[in-house]
Image (cartoon, rainbow, N blue to C red):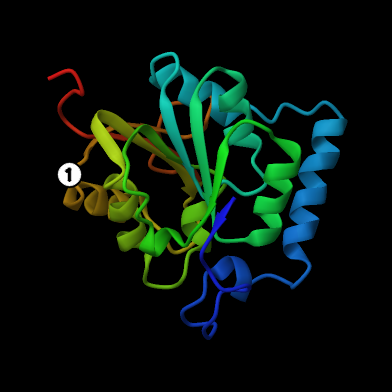
Amino acid sequence: MADHLPNPPAGTDDDRPRWFSQTPETHSQWYVDRFRELAAEGADLAGEARFVDAVVSPGARVLDAGCGPGRLAGALHERGHDVVGVDVDPVLLAAAEADHAGPRWERADLATLDLGETFDAVVSAGNVLVFLAPGTEDEVVQRMAGHVAPGGVLVVGFRLDRHVTIESVEAAARAGGLEPEHRFSTWDLRPWSETADFVVAVLRRPGSDAA
């Protein structure tokens, strides 16, 4: 696992990700334990992976941006995709590496993300956008957009009862060269509604790798 960040990320609560500044110190391990328990109970944890698998070609290159303990990246790898998982939290990444062999794991802040490569799909699930450092949301969306290959997609899913709006995300994506393509209210394709409290959006970069 590549790791080039301080542990924990330095700074005040005003410039650290909300994942660290607005949750208890034990939250990361609780999160890991919660999803390990759900997996052991046989819970369906692959809904996001089924969605992403449906919008990319077999054997696609996928970046899981804000991968947490790796359940989405692991599920996509099992479906035959070439997956890179990136997260800022060392506790979550250690769990991902321990529980999900196959993906490549990188520790990085999404606000400064620069892997020097592009992907058929970049995915940000699990409410990643609402746990970013304050004021970095547009930069993160544009950083993710910069990792989308021609013809590829950015897929984001997040709650709408916080401070991030779908309109602001789509505007930042457009600034990064992507075009909004779809909105859904859930990962299982329920139609978009202006009253929805959750959104799954697909944004695409025009063009094609084959062009």
130 to the left or right of 22: left
In this rendering, the answer to whether 32 lies above or below 203 is below
> Which residue is rendered at x = 39% and y = 15% of the image?
57
**Which residue, as the protein is rendered here, is positioned at the far bottom?**
12
98 to the left or right of 182: right
**Image coords of residue 173 (percent x, y):** 25, 48
> Which residue is rendered at x = 17% and y = 52% of the image?
175
Instruction: Choose top left, top right, bottom left or bottom right for residue 37.
Output: top right
Can residue 117 be seen from the camera position used here? yes
Q: Where, quadrant-wise, is the C terminus in this rendering? A: top left
**Image coords of residue 141 (percent x, y):** 33, 53
Residue on which disc 1 sits: 177
In this rendering, the answer to whether 195 lies above or below 6 is above
176 to the left or right of 201: left
Label 1 SS: loop
Q: Report crowding for label 1: few under 14, some 14 to 19, many 20 or more residues within 10 A (C-alpha).
A: some
> Which residue is rendered at x = 72% and y = 60% of the image?
28
Frontmost residue, 188 versus 172: 172
In this rendering, the answer to whether 76 lies above or below 10 is above
Query: Which kind of residue does numbered mark 1 sit on?
Result: Gly
